[in-house]
Structure formats: structure tokens, C-alpha cells
Image: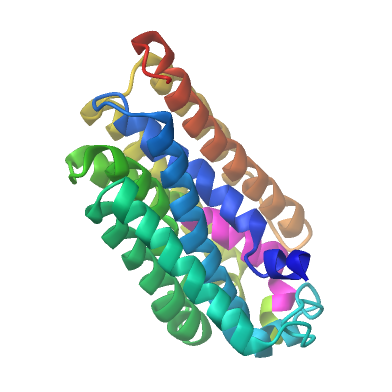
């Protein structure tokens, strides 16, 4: 039963978000003192809150999941876990995660993670995902909160650097999410979820994705110009943005859109990992890597 409860927290989504938490934490650590304990508590706190949101998402999306071949066998869809027990599990995760951030980091990071939770659970899962083509944009706001929480756990204040970081990950979410929607378009059509590729077509989605990758690249360079990043970050950012742009700007049509979207998706994962890694590596010369 333990394995089943872990599965409804969507561990893959948690791990992906924790990579972005590291990016925010490492960026802030360039200008503020940090400790290993703070890093661990921040990671665990954010992980618990994200897990709670994913459990609620699984509960609320049972009707949608039943229509999609990828999700129709999920444990909650099949009735393998009592819904009331799952909801209680989500509440406990939320309270523990938020409390940990409040106590071990600072109240601002706890408030911010709750804002992300509200956007994901209420505005995205319960509203825009089912009713509007802008659901992905709303979801990108919640998806950009984890790196901001990582940053605020260290600094306890919002700066221009923090705004750029939030904007960077918000922009990153869009082509990343549209790519998923594109290569899983049949599932979204069957579940009647109004994502951009389904509503406006794959070419319109591609145009939006290209625009978002360009905007992401500009903000990434802006983070170097107005933040505390070094030449190592600039080099990795330039290479990553060029690589992602090259993949996204390739020709795409009905014959290759699945392969194309999977390439964009895989590259997006490499990009976010590279950003987080270089920010961590840049801390080594300053002697602040614990």
C-alpha cells in the first residue's frame, strides 16, 4: 500500500521540480550564507507541498484520467485507494511541507509555496485545465514557483534577480508543456482537454513554442546581466539556449510532429538540468558548497 500512496504523489514531477528548486537555491547562495540543513529542509518542504498538489490533482482528474490510455490504470481511477484517505494524505503533506518551510527557512518561502499550490490546485487543475486554452499558461505560473521558493528560502526577499528567475522558469514551462501536449495529443483530444495543439493546431503551437524559447533565451541572458551569475553560467546558458532554439526552429509538419515535439521536450529537460548544474558548480570557487 505504501507504494500505491507514493505513486499518487507523481514522483517524476516532484523530481523535475526539485531540480528547479536547486537552481533558485544555488543562485541565491552566491550572495547569501547557506547551510546544508537549509537546503535539505527546503527540498523536503517543497517536495511535500508538490506531492500534496499532485495527490489532489489525481483525485480531481479521475474522470479525465479514465478517458486517457496513458492514465486509465492509475490507482485512484481503479479505486485502489480510498478517496477520503487520499485527501487526508494530501492535507498532511501540505501541512508538513509548509510548516517545514515556515520553521526552517522563512515565512515568505512558505507563503510563496502556498501561492503556487493555489494556482496549481484551484486555478489550473479545477478550472483552466478543463475550460481554457490558457490552462498551460496558468499552470506555468505554479510550475515557476519552486525555483522562486528555493531562492527565497535563502534570501527572504524578492529582488530583480528573483523576478527574472521566476520569469525564466515560467517561460521554460510553456514550450516544455506544449511539447508534451503535442506528442500526447490523442489523449488530450479523447479527454477533451483544450490544450493549444488540439484547439489551434500543431503549427500554431509550434509558433508559440518558438516565441517562448526566444523569450526564455533573452531572460536567461538578462539573468547574467542583472544577477549574480558568472561567465560559466553565461557559457552554459548560451549553449543551452542555442541548442533548444535549433531544435525548436526545425521544420515540422503532420509527418514528423511527434518526433519533433519529443525532441523539444527532451532538450527542455537538458536545459533545465544544465542551468541548475552550472549554478551549483559556480558556488565551488566561493567556498560556499557546504
Q: State the image coordinates of residue 213 (x, y, percent, origin top left).
A: 46, 46
Q: Quadrant of residue 28?
A: top left
**Magenta region, main secondary structure:** helix
Asked if residue 246 is positioned above or below residue 109 in the image, the reply reads above
Q: Quadrant of residue 198?
A: bottom right
Please state, as top left, top right, bottom left or bottom right, where the N terminus lies in the image: bottom right
Q: Could you say which is closer to the camera, residue 114 or residue 222?
A: 114
Q: Is residue 75 left or right of residue 126?
A: right
Please state, as top left, top right, bottom left or bottom right, where the C terminus lies in the image: top left
At 43% from the left and 44% from the top, the residue drawn is 41
* Number of marks: 0
Q: State the image coordinates of residue 185 (x, y, percent, origin top left).
A: 69, 72
Q: State the image coordinates of residue 79 (x, y, percent, origin top left).
A: 77, 88
- Image: magenta residue range: 173-187
Asked if residue 146 is positioned above or below residue 164 in the image, the reply reads below
Decide whether residue 99 is among the magenta residues.
no
Q: Is residue 140 visible?
A: no
Amino acid at each position: 500500500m505504501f507504494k500505491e500512496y507514493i505513486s499518487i504523489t507523481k514522483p517524476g514531477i516532484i523530481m523535475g521540480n526539485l531540480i528547479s528548486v536547486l537552481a533558485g537555491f544555488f543562485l541565491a547562495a552566491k550572495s547569501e550564507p547557506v547551510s546544508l540543513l537549509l537546503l535539505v529542509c527546503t527540498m523536503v518542504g517543497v517536495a511535500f507541498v508538490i506531492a500534496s498538489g499532485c495527490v489532489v490533482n489525481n483525485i480531481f482528474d479521475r474522470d479525465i484520467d479514465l478517458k486517457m490510455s496513458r492514465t486509465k490504470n492509475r490507482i485512484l481511477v481503479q479505486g485502489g485507494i480510498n478517496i477520503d484517505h487520499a485527501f487526508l494524505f494530501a492535507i498532511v503533506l501540505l501541512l508538513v511541507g509548509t510548516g517545514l518551510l515556515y520553521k526552517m527557512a522563512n515565512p515568505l518561502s512558505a507563503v510563496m509555496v502556498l501561492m503556487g499550490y493555489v494556482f496549481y490546485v484551484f486555478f489550473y487543475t479545477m478550472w483552466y485545465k478543463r475550460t481554457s486554452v490558457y490552462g498551460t499558461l496558468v499552470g506555468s505560473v505554479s510550475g515557476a514557483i519552486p525555483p522562486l521558493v528555493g531562492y527565497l528560502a535563502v534570501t527572504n526577499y524578492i529582488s530583480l534577480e528573483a523576478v527574472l528567475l521566476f520569469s525564466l522558469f515560467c517561460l521554460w514551462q510553456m514550450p516544455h508543456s506544449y511539447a508534451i501536449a503535442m506528442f500526447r495529443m490523442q489523449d488530450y483530444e479523447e479527454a477533451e482537454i483544450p490544450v493549444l495543439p488540439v484547439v489551434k493546431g500543431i503549427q500554431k503551437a509550434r509558433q508559440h513554442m518558438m516565441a517562448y524559447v526566444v523569450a526564455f533565451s533573452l531572460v536567461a541572458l538578462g539573468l547574467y546581466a542583472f544577477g549574480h551569475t558568472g561567465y560559466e553560467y553565461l557559457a552554459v546558458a548560451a549553449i543551452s539556449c542555442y541548442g533548444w532554439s535549433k531544435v525548436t526552429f526545425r521544420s515540422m509538419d503532420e509527418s514528423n510532429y511527434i518526433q519533433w515535439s519529443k525532441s523539444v521536450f527532451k532538450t527542455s529537460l537538458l536545459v533545465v538540468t544544465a542551468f541548475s548544474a552550472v549554478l551549483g558548480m559556480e558556488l565551488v570557487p566561493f567556498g560556499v558548497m557546504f
